[in-house]
Amino acid sequence: MTPSPASIDATATALQAQGYLPSRELATAAFLALRLARPLLLEGAPGTGKTAIASALAAALQRPLIRLQCYEGLDLASAAYEWNYARQMIEIRLAQAGGAQRTADELFARRFLIERPLLQALTTTPAPVLLIDELDRADAPFEAFLLEFLADFQLTIPELGTITAATPPLVVLTSNRSREIHDAVKRRCLYHWLDYPDADRELAVLRARLPGIDAQLAAQVVAFVQGLRQLDLYKLPGLAETLDWSRALVELNAVSLDPATVQSTLGVLLKYQDDIARVQGSEAARLLAEMRQVARG
Ligand SMILES: Nc1ncnc2c1ncn2[C@@H]1O[C@H](COP(=O)(O)OP(=O)(O)OP(=O)(O)O)[C@@H](O)[C@H]1O
Ligand SMILES: [Mg+2]
C-alpha cells in the first residue's frame, strides 16, 4: 500500500500512471476524499469514467478493490454479511454427538459469518477501495442501511456487535441518476459530476488507452464524437463509445474517417435506431465536413 498522494497534482499523476486521465476537478475530489476520509459520490452521463476511477485509484494506491454492484432487491445478505447456517447446523450436530451443548453466543461467532463486500471493506487490510456501483439501481431501504456505514465506516450486527474499520476504506459510489440518491446519503459524501470530456482530454484518453492508433484518425474520431454530442440525440456517446469505436476502426485498418466507414460502424457509437437514422447520411456528411475544417484550422 502506498501512502495517500500529498497533493492534487500527485493524485492526478498517480491516476494518469494507471491510464486514467482525470479532470482537475475530479482529481481534487479524489484527493479530498482520501484526505478527509469521506466517501466520494460520482454522478454523470454513462461511459464517462465513474466506475473506472475506482479501479484506477485502487491500483494507484496499491490497495485491494472490493466491488458491490447494486441492483433492485439487493439485500443485507448479499451486500454486507450472512450467517453460515449450514456450518452452524454442523456445529450443533457435532456438539450433540459429543454430548455437549452449544450456546447461541458460541454459534454467532465471527467464524460463522460470511463476509460480503461491505463487511469485507471493513476487515480487509490494507484498507481497500470499495466501489458501490450504480447505487440508483438499489432500493431506498438499502440506502438507509448504508447511512451508518458511510458515516462511521462501521456495521452493527445484532448478534455480534459493531464492527469498525481500523483504517477507513476509500468508498466510491456511482449513480446514473435513474432516480435521485437520498439527501442523507449525499450529506455523508463528497459529490462530483462527471461530464463528457472536452476534446483535448478525450484525445489524451484515447491516445493513452490505444497507444497504437494513428494520430490523424484519433483526432478525427474525437472531432466527430464531439460534434455528435452537440446533436439532440436520445443517447449521446460517452468515452466508452469513443474507445470502442476507435478500436473498431483500428480493427478495420481505417486510417481516416470517410462517409462509408462512418456509415458501416455507427452501431458501435450509437445504440438507438432513431439516433442512427438521424445521423446517417447528410448529418454524418456535415459532421465530417466540420471535422475536416477543424483539422485544417
Ligand atoms: N478519464 C478517463 N481516463 C481514461 N479512461 C477513461 C476515462 N474515463 C473513462 N475511461 C474509459 O472509458 C470507459 C468507460 O468508463 P466507465 O465504465 O468507468 O464509465 P461509467 O461512467 O461507469 O459508465 P456507466 O454509467 O455506463 O457505468 C472505460 O473503458 C474507462 O476505462
Ligand atoms: Mg459504470
Image (cartoon, rainbow, N blue to C red):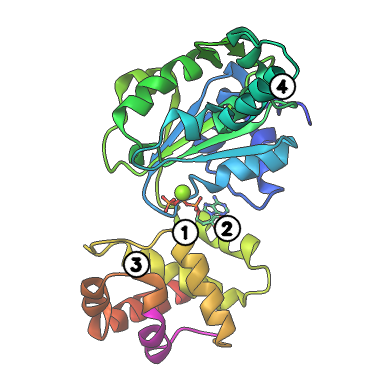
Q: Quadrant of residue 43?
A: top left
Q: Position of 122 compared to 281: left or right?
A: right
Q: Amino acid at mark 2?
A: Val
Residue occupied by mark 1: 239
Q: Mark 2, mark 3: which one is toward the viewer?
A: 2
Residues 176 and 12: in front is: 176
Q: Where is residue 101? Give x, y as percent.
A: 67, 10
- Residue 13 visible in the displayed image: no
Residue occupied by mark 2: 205
Q: Characterize the magenta stretch by its predominant secondary structure.
A: helix
Circle nearer the N terminus (3, 4): 4
Stretch in magenta: 255-266
Residue occupied by mark 3: 227
Q: Where is residue 3? Give x, y as percent.
A: 76, 26
Answer few, some or many: residues within 10 Å of disc 3's Cα (few below 14, many 20 plus, some between 14 and 19). Answer: some
Q: Quadrant of residue 235?
A: bottom left
